[in-house]
Image: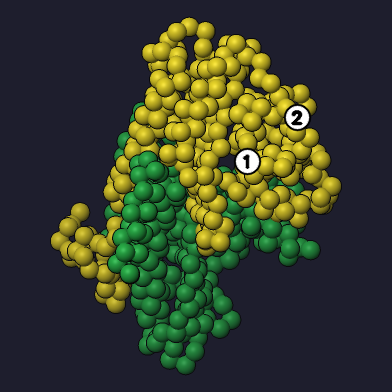
Amino acid sequence: MASTVELASAFIEGAPPGELADVVADVQALTSEGEDIIPSLLPAFKRYNETQLATVKLPGSSQEVIVSGFNALEGNRYFDPESQTSFEVDHTTQTASAAQSYALESEHADLIKSLLKSFGVHAREHYPNCSYGVYPIEDDSAIAIVLVANRYSPNNFWNGRFRAIYQLPVSSSSSTLTGNIHVDVHYYEDGNVALNTTKPINISVPSVSAESIVSRIAAAERDYQEALNRAFVQTSEGVFKGLRRQLPITRQKVEWEKVGGYRLGQDISGGKGR
Amino acid sequence: MADAQFDSALDLLRRLNPRDTKTNLQAITSIVPELTEDLLSSVDQPLEIRRCPQSNRDYLLCDYNRDGDSYRSPWSNEFDPPLEDGTVPSERVRKLEIAANESFDVYRELYYEGGVGSVYFWDLDDGFAGVILLKKGVTPGSQSSGEWDSIHVFEATDRARMSHYKLTSTVILHLSNKTEALGDMDLSGNMTRQVEVDLPVESDASHVANVGRLVEDMELKMRNLLQEVYFGKAKDVVGELRSLGPLSDANRDRETQREMIMSMQK
């Protein structure tokens, strides 16, 4: 049987957007250890933060930067190429400290800089509240581009998160961009409703230049959002309607006084028969 | 302490992915075994189907037709596996239960055009109570599916020529979709609503009609609510996260509009 720490870790990693603190409070109330359980959950907090692209404020700045597996250094330190800073993250509180200047060591530093610029323009045009990062990965043979956009409205019982994670080998002149877009929405007024999506991305990039890469990303994200919007309509008109009708085919509500004496298939079904 | 833990367990289940309620419920009760009984009776889960060996008809399983490890079929009133002294409703309430099952069978066919339904009643000191269960699943394509579970629990308390009804309704709705352009989309969850009302009762037959109308109105309300939340609200939040059109255009439009309003106010 799974241990309490394993079960509690799964709860932490399953926290919906913007509700990590609430889940932690519930976990503390449920385990006999109370807040003493927190240190043993540290690996789960770290996995949650890196997977969900948690954002932290750099010390002395209002800028939010991303925590991910792509910009991880030793220990719990991470780096941000745009501000040329490295920082330490407390994974349980999602706070940054001990900032130091950090010089990016990459053969592709110029490409990363121009990607940050172009991708930043794209991000600000489409995400009202987002953070993004561009990092050298896999021994400087590839580049990761990540974006996270959060909107939290706990007073109205909803929260949402949009994540885009792309990777691109940069060793040759043309390349293929791969990754995933995830959208997670939680609505919890008198209920619990969740939208969770994963869209794999696989697009060829004719030339490894910032403009070319960002224009391909912009097109893929737009196509995906349009497909998602269509899916809401199609599911509502299709599967949802097929489950339960709004009214019987007769457009009449059930005549409950009469219905007890009737058997199935008689004229109560408005001549539909069976 | 126990009450606080129970509330925390419910809060946690309201936050974690509703697709995984069964797994999460098991995890919680393995951490706090004392909560098992209370949680099982207050957390709704998708209903399971069983075939009644006597009538050869399907029925639905829940905590209210369970006695030990056996479940009572609404069609035969027998337990499966058989029980010598399983709890069954009194003769009067069983008669009502049979009538309600007949009526809700028609209701199910009219609104669900398929699926499975079951109604279970039990005696109370000053009246009776019951649960109306409806379930339907569809898989129109290999890549999309939907499942609807309705669970309506009510109490009918006797008053002079009236009855007081308290209805608590939960609908669990799971939808999933997969295409090349869309990838994987899962839209799952549950919503609960309550209503209390006094209605006139002339005879026992009135109860079936009263409960029928209450459930019918509630399901209409909840279907509209689910439609709004699943397809309206969720889509709106996606639009809040990401704007399809450029935000600079939207900001410029807002600016122009504000200037127009300002100039009109002058």
Question: Which three-letter amino acid code belongs to the residue tagged 2?
Answer: Gln
Q: Going by the picture, which residue comes out furthest to the front?
A: B266
Q: Amino acid at mark 1?
A: Gln
Taking B202 as reference, is A57 left or right? right
Q: Tell me if residue A168 comes above or below residue A67 in the rendering.
A: above
How far across and how far down the image is residue B143, in percent? 37, 34
Look at the image and name its color scheme: by chain
**Residue B96: x percent and y percent?**
42, 74
Dot 1 corresponds to which residue?
Answer: A63
Q: Quadrant of the N terminus of chain B?
A: bottom right
Q: Nearer the viewer, residue A266 or B160?
A: B160
Colour assigned to chain A in the rendering is yellow
**SS at mark 2?**
strand
Chain B is shown in which shade?
green
Quadrant hosting residue B227: bottom left
Pointer 1 and pointer 2 on the same chain = yes
Residue A72 in percent (x, y) is at 69, 26
Q: Residue at x 76, y 38 (%)?
A: A97
Q: Residue at x 69, y 39 (%)?
A: A58
Identity of the residue drawn at 71% across and 54% down: A26
